Image (cartoon, grey):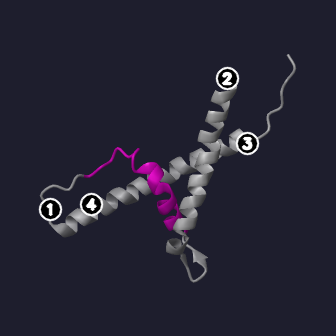
Amino acid sequence: MTRGEIWKDFLKHTVLTLVIALFLFLIFKAVFTKNGETEYFYVWLCCGGPFGIRRMFFWLVPQGYDLGSTVGIIAVNFIVGGLIGGVILTWRLVVAVWYMLPRSKKPM
């Protein structure tokens, strides 16, 4: 790997993921904090949504339903996408920590 590829890989897997997660947390902090207590399920959904919606294979397509059912199906899509995205975000944060850990070089 060249030095440019290493920097690109580091920025993609570490810095960008941490910045996006922090940005989403700060934006949605008012949504999941009530009376000074944090609702961790809402944190999981709000911060994981952008990471999981595009990777979600389970899309229910509302066809032939009334307005209430259509909104309900779309809400289920976003909830499932947020749950999947929470897992993906957790994994990407673990990878970011892995990239930041110092590695010892073994002599050959």
Residue under numbered circle 3: 100
Q: Nearer the viewer, residue 32 or 30?
A: 30
CB-based contact (under 8 Å), mark 3 and mark 4 = no
Closest to the camera, between mark 3 and mark 1, is 3
CB-based contact (under 8 Å), mark 1 and mark 4 = yes
Range of magenta residues: 40-60
Residue under numbered circle 1: 65
- Mainly helix, strand or loop, the magenta region? helix
| Residue type beneath disc 4 | Ile
**Horizontal side of residue 42 vs 99, given as left or right:** left
Among the two numbered marks 4 and 2 on one chain, the one whose residue lies closer to the N terminus? 2
Q: Is residue 49 magenta?
A: yes
Label 3 vs label 1: CA separation? 49 Å
What x and y, as percent, mark residue 43? 53, 64
Provide the secondary structure element on which disc 1 rests: loop
Residue under numbered circle 4: 73
| Residue type beneath disc 1 | Tyr
Among the two numbered marks 3 and 2 on one chain, the one whose residue lies closer to the N terminus? 2
| Residue type beneath disc 2 | Thr
Provide the secondary structure element on which disc 4 rests: helix
Residue extending farthest front: 4
Residue under numbered circle 2: 2
Closest to the camera, between mark 3 and mark 2, is 2
Q: Is residue 54 above or below residue 2?
A: below
Query: What residue lies at 57% left-to-right and 55% top-to-bottom?
Result: 21
Label 4 vs label 2: CA separation? 47 Å
Label 3 vs label 2: CA separation? 18 Å
Q: Is residue 41 above or below residue 84?
A: below
Among the two numbered marks 3 and 4 on one chain, the one whose residue lies closer to the N terminus? 4
For label 2, the crowd category at 10 Å Cα-Cα, with few meaning under 14, some 14 to 19 and many 20 or more, is: few
Q: Is residue 98 above or below residue 35?
A: above
Q: Is residue 25 magenta?
A: no
